């Protein structure tokens, strides 16, 4: 299973798309039984 997620912050990245990735992978939802991801913006 996917544990580490990194997003490359380039000039071409749109703020909405970055926000979606932050919502999906950046929030801790372990109390809901969902997997935990190590999320980074680089």
Image: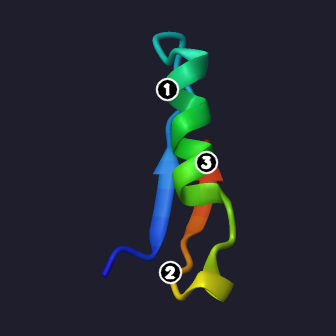
Real-space CA distance between mark 3 and mark 2, rounded to the nearest whole angstrom: 14 Å
Real-space CA distance between mark 1 and mark 2, rounded to the nearest whole angstrom: 22 Å
Confirm or deny contact between disc 3 and disc 2 (CB under 8 A). no
Q: Earlier in the sequence, mark 3 or mark 2?
A: 3
Question: Is residue 5 shown above or below 30?
Answer: above
Query: How would you rate the neighbour count of disc 1 (Cα within 10 Å): few for under 14, some for 14-19, many for 20 or more?
Result: few
Question: Is residue 12 shown above or below 24?
Answer: above
Left or right: residue 5 versus residue 38 is: left
Confirm or deny contact between disc 1 and disc 3 (CB under 8 A). no
For the C terminus, give its image quadrant.
Answer: top right
Q: Give the number of callouts.
A: 3
The quarter of the picture where residue 1 lies is: bottom left
Please state which of the two labelled residues, at mark 1 or mark 2, is closer to the viewer: 2
Residue 6: mark in rendering: none
Give the residue number, with chain letter if any, for mark 3.
23
Question: Is residue 8 shown above or below 33?
Answer: above
Residue 34: mark in rendering: 2
Q: Residue at x 56, y 79 (%)?
A: 36
Q: Earlier in the sequence, mark 1 or mark 2?
A: 1
Query: How would you rate the neighbour count of disc 2 (Cα within 10 Å): few for under 14, some for 14-19, many for 20 or more?
Result: few
Q: Residue at x 60, y 83 (%)?
A: 32
Left or right: residue 27 versus residue 33 is: right
Residue 17: mark in rendering: 1
Left or right: residue 4 versus residue 42 is: left
The quarter of the picture where residue 3 lies is: bottom left
Percent position (x, y) of residue 6? 50, 52
Per the image, label 3 sits on a secondary structure element best described as helix
Per the image, label 1 sits on a secondary structure element best described as helix
């Amino acid at each position: 299973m996917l544990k580490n997620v990194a997003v490359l912050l380039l000039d071409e990245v749109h703020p909405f798309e970055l926000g979606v990735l932050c919502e999906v992978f950046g929030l801790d939802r372990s109390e809901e039984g969902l997997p935990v991801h190590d999320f980074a913006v680089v």
